[in-house]
Amino acid sequence: MKKIIVTLIVIVMLLSNALTAQESREQKLSNFINTTLKTLPIIPSVSIAISNNTETLYANGFGKYDIENNLKCNSSTNFYIASTTKSFLGLLATLLDNEEKIDFNEQITNYKPFKNFSNTDIFKNITVLDLITHQSGIDNHYLSFLLAYSGDYTNETIVKLIEEETFQNEKRKAFEYSNFGYYLLGVLIKEELGLSWKDLLDEKVFKPLDMENTTAYISRSKNIAKPYVSVFPEKLKKIHLQKSDATMHAAGGLVSNANDIGKFLSFFLSKGKHNTEALVSKALIESTYTKHVSTSHDGIKVFDGKAYGKGWRIGNFNKHSVVYHFGGYSGYYSHLSFLPEKNLGVAVFINHELGLPIANLIAKYAYDLYLGNDSNLKKHEKTLKKKIPKLLESAQKSQTAHEKKQAARSWELSLEKQNYIGHYYNEKFGTAIVTFNNGENYIEIGNLKAVCTPFPQLDTMRVELIPNSGSVIKFIVENNESVSISYGGEIFNKIK
């Protein structure tokens, strides 16, 4: 009896110690994220998920996802996840290939709409696999503006632009990261199968994995973290550019949250299982992050990027293989990664322009914390304390200089401001509407709208239709009347 009692006491003590360690680990991560938000007060909110092959180990939210309405972020808060969408499209394409609905090795000219083009030369010798591994060797100047930003298009417009405006890039079929291949994949699926990639993801991925709040339709999503901009805490404001269903595209068109994304990470770490049930084969999952092209990942010093698979980058972290993808858009940043050998995955979402260094720092801290690399935690804490404030200070200085430069500019207009108003049309970009209100000119193209500011050339106005990306509108004036505008190298003729 005494032996049994002693054994029970030991078991209870071990369980208690394990629970205490678990609580301590979660508390450490929470403390680090809370300290991050205090150190960088321009970041409104952070959402994080940590998973292994059987469950989500930790899911939480910090800060406020909607400052104006005082709404606190939690694990159910939805974020636009930008280019991490590509990891989902890579999986979808692999599933469709497995079902023989598409063939990775087939040339896209064997599929609609490409096989129906009057001239298919530029699209020959490009396979479906080339599209999702960024090796198509072709590009198009118009699709990103329409699909990712303005939303002012029809499916017929997109197909026509693909046929008429696609060109061969300088690198030919060498790896060149862009959204274009995924745009084409989305169009191919729609035209060939008669089904939307958005609905197929829901059928084949979201529902089987019980990802109840992940969707490609932003109109169906609630509790969405609002996008914010400004490097000054007192000037923090929502970005006017908001996502719509029309701008949720195949290269960056999903909304998800920590609870759902934890399931997605577990699905990959378990090699295709959900709740112990094998939904797909281990070989199929592993094929999505098998190297298809060697490439470094310059400019973002998080992981040592070495290759690209089907919607995943592949690299190293602390000498371990890491599978990952990042995503950025005006007011959002997302980090999605997992270590196959260590059975651990991390996702971090942030709703601010400068989310990149913070999301990646939090992810590295989480990995080292859960892997027991305690010595590295001090390094991350030091980075947060020393380097992050310097990054913010540098950004603030740059912004102050920019604003000073802007304020020094004067208008160089030959007409009164209200005489530039009108509807200007371009068959590729759509309609640009110039208005006048309370002494200010505004321009609107589809989902985009911006106030016009001075530019030191005759009959020009500077705009930021895409936040933090300035461009110039040139008005063509004839007989004291604005008859057209030049924007993005294109002419928009006045129609009314």
Image (cartoon, rainbow, N blue to C red):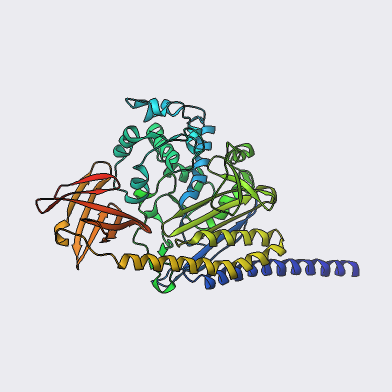
Query: Where 186 sits versus 225, above or below?
Result: above
In front here: 399 or 101? 399
Residue 340 on image: x %, y %? 66, 47
Q: Residue at x 49, y 33 (%)?
A: 173
Query: Where 183 sits versus 14, above or below?
Result: above
In front here: 491 or 412? 412
The N terminus - image quarter: bottom right
Q: Is residue 56 left or right of residue 373?
A: left
Q: Residue at x 42, y 73 (%)?
A: 70
- Is there any visible trace of residue 274 in the rendered image? no
Q: Residue at x 51, y 33 (%)?
A: 129
Residue furthest to the left in view is 479
Tell me where residue 144 sits by quadrant.
top left
Q: Is residue 236 left or right of residue 160?
A: right
Query: Where 375 sits versus 202, above or below?
Result: below
Tell me where residue 181 sits by quadrant.
top left
Residue 319 on image: x %, y %? 70, 50
- Is there any visible trace of residue 390 in the rendered image? yes
Q: Residue at x 14, y 62 (%)?
A: 416
Residue 240 on image: x %, y %? 34, 61
Q: Is residue 303 left or right of residue 425?
A: right
